Structures are given as structure tokens and as C-alpha cells.
Image: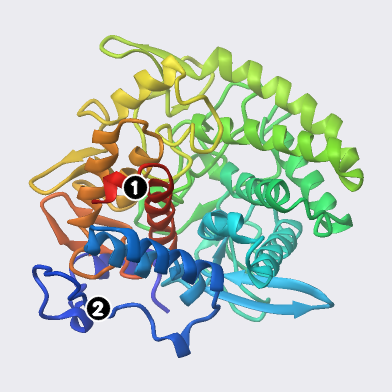
Amino acid sequence: MMKRRDFIQQSAFAAAGFAISVKGFGSFHSNEFPVVRIPESQRRFKSKAVEKIIADLQKNTANKELAWLFGNCFPNTLDTTVDFEIIDGQPDTYVITGDIDAMWLRDSSAQVWPYIPLCHEDKELQQLLKGVINRQVKCILKDPYANAFYKDESKVSEWKETDITDMKPGIHERKWEIDSLCYPIRLAHGYWKETRDISVFGEQFVAAMQLVIRTFREQQRKDGKGPYSFQRKTAWATDGVPMAGYGYPAKPNGLICSMFRPSDDATVYPYLIPSNFFALESLKQLQEMGTAIPSMKSLVAPAGELAVELERALKQYAGFTHPKFGKIYAFEVNGFDSYNLMDDANIPSLLALPYLGGVKQNDPVYQNTRRFVWSGNNPFFFKGKVAEGIGGPHIGLDMVWPMSIVMKGLTSNNDQEIKWCLDTLQRTHGKTGFMHESFHKDNPEQYTRKWFAWANTIFGEFVWKVYREKPQLLK
């Protein structure tokens, strides 16, 4: 079995196999674009509402290459990654991340997020989304510290022999990441706000949310290190957790420890600020739902108490006064006045804070932070011959993540900036018609992960947002 790190290393410079299907196009003329979307007969799920949006956008968009990219990317999650069925009378949807046959709580939530507004037009799509929520509840109840799961317990994890942690059957990977528990709340809250359907929020859902709050409390580590530890036998330093699997010391201050980032890389300092902001927003969403939905009433008080504590701690510990940019948000802190000043392309990130509701877009500290992370002062900001953007340790130096360019556009009100993001994404798909995990700053044909559904779907989300709000930018 090919491991994730091996796959990334192998695919980074060996993507020619995928390019075979699109051989022969180096420049684009009128409507002459190769068919790269999976054939209709092989698609995992078909949504009439999604197809209507694709048809409308492609008909009304002057930029045909961008419209072609949208038609490939926006439905990619539905086309290739979902497994929908009815189990015990309830919808159940297993969602793989793409080229890895496992379901990440984070990725699966983000992959289906843009489809929520379409539930009114497509009840089958609504059932699919309910199935994702149900499946995520099962995952959380299995192990709230795990980040990725298999469809059933018969499959053995590739990490079983190398990870020193409490690996249970059905778990692909057990990296504790705060955002793994936040994303399912975001999905459930977004689904409820759009549909007002409360049928999915039963006893099991409430039990899962109670476990989320308990896990957040455990990882505040006020009374010892808590029940979670993780070590891995590997040469990749960012895949393991130091200090016997508990991470470097953190002074208890109300923030929540996260041993890993949303990139699945180990944190340097345990208090990961973007993820703590995300947790605060998630707790507020649980409060809102608990106030309105009778079955969730028991969550209101514990979610509210933790939210107050977390908000107070973020106000006190998240900020850093930078000599060039003024007050900004740090990426990681430890409570001992140590700060890690950087940003990573994976979401939640500092750049993505308004997108996830963590801060207001016009927050002056965020705006200062935004200028910092998109500059050479961020050690993981890369600028090359064809593009610039944010990467991270997961792939290494000089590799820009399209996700960071998408997020720059999604968190901007500036037409020129949004247009730049669209243009950059259009010219860096590596002649494939899809987005990737990362590409080299000097050569977009040198990329990682030919099949990464989250990158495709969030690109589609961005283009669709521009189409609705600023269609003139798609010319």
C-alpha cells in the first residue's frame, strides 16, 4: 500500500500519466477544450442542481477556459468521491478525499459545503448531505481524536504498525486536530440554517457534540496532559509528536491544544490560533442550534461556558505586535510568551479566518495579519516566475497551494485582487483542467496530487461566488 508521504513524493514530479488524457493542448482557442471530467456513466452521484449551475455559468461566462475549469472542478466531489446508501433507514454518505481511500472529517465537510444552498432544488442532494452528517457522527463517536476513517472496520490502517497511539478498527489515522471536530459542526449548522431540517439532530448527534465539548475541555490540559498521545516511527519529523507524544509544553490559559495542524503536520507550539478561532465559532454555532432545536438544548450551557473562556483567552494570547505590520494574529503560541509567526495554506489558516467566521473581514488585526502572511515575512510564502502564494511544511519549499490563492480571493472585496486570483488559478492548473494540492512556483506542471477533491470543490465555490456577485470579473 502506498503511504501518503510516498504518494506525494512520487507524484510531485511524475504527473505525466494523468496528462495523457489531455495531451496536445498547450494553448486554448474558442471552445476547444479536452473532455477531462469523468464519463457520466462512471459518476458516483448526479445532481440536477449542480448540472444546471454548470450549464448556466458556461453559457454566460465569456472566459471559456475558466468556465471549463469550473465544469470540471465544481462537481468533482460528487463525480468521484461519494458513496451514498441507506443504513438502518437513515442516509449514510462516505466521502473519500480523492486519491486516498479514507474519509477525513475536515475534507469531507469542506468538499460538500458549497452544495448546501442547492438542497431546495435537489432533494436527493439534500439526502446526500444528511448522509455526510450521519457518517461524521459515527466517526466522532468512534474516536474524537482521530482525523480520518475507513468506511468499515475490516480495512487495516497503513499506519497500524508505525503509530504509537490508541488505534481502533476502522480508523485510518489518529492525528488530533481541533478542526476535525469543528468542520462537522460547521456543516451541520450550515445545513440547518439553509433547510431548517432538524431530523438529523437526534440522540446520536447530541452524544457526538457532547463528546466534542468534552474533548475540547480535555485538551485545554488544565489537569495534566490528557488522554491523547501520538508517536510515529518515521523519518518525517512533522509526522510525529515530540515529548513522548504529548507535544512541547504549553502553559494552561484557556486555549485548546492541537497536536496537529489541518495539514496533518505536527504543531510547533500546541495552541494553534486559527483552529482555536474556529473552535470558538463552532461553539457559538452549537449554542445557536441548541437554543432553537429542542433535542440539542443540553448543549447550550456547556458550549456557552467554554466559548466565553476561549474568547477571553484568544483576546489575551492570540495577538503579537510585529515591528513592520503592527498587531497581528500569531499562528501558534504556547502560553509562555513564545510565538510562531507564519501561515499555512491549509484551512483553517490565518488567511481564512473570516471565511470560517472566526473574525470579521474588516477586523484591523486580521487585515494586518493578511498583509503579513502574503509577504516574504511569512516563511511559507513563495513567489516565483509564474505565481505566488502560501504553502507549508507538508510538501516543502517553493510549492504554492492553489487553496491559498482561492482563499485570498474568497476573503477579498477588491475586484483587482479577485481578478488576479482567478487569472493565476487559470494559468496554473498544469494543463489538466483540475486544481491540485500544490504546484511549483516556477512550473505549474510540477504538482502534487492529481486527484484532490477539496481543492477542486473550493475552486468551484470561489468561481461560483464571483459569478453570482461580480460576474464582470469572469470576462
Q: Residues within 10 Å of mark 1 (few under 14, many from 20)?
A: some
Q: Residues within 10 Å of mark 2 (few under 14, many from 20)?
A: some
Residue 433, how many percent across, how many down? 26, 68
- Residue at the image position 49 percent from the left and 45 percent from the top: 241
As helix, strand or loop, the secondary structure at mark 1 comes to helix
Which colour style is shown? rainbow
* Residue 392 showing in the rendered view: no
Q: CA distance from mark 2 to mark 1?
A: 32 Å
Task: Give the mark, 2 or 1, whose residue is nearer the N terminus.
Answer: 2
Please give the count of numbered marks on the rendered protein: 2
Amino acid at the residue labelled 2: Phe
Residue 196, how many percent across, how many down? 77, 50
Circle 2 residue: 18
- Residue at the image position 54 percent from the left and 36 percent from the top: 275
The answer to whether residue 14 is left or right of residue 73 is: left
The answer to whether residue 196 is left or right of residue 352 is: right
Identify the image quadrant of residue 233: bottom left
Circle 1 residue: 471
The circle drawn on residue 105 is none
Q: Is residue 418 above or below residue 36?
A: above
Residue 388, how many percent across, how many down? 19, 42
Which one is closest to the eye, mark 2 or mark 1?
A: 1
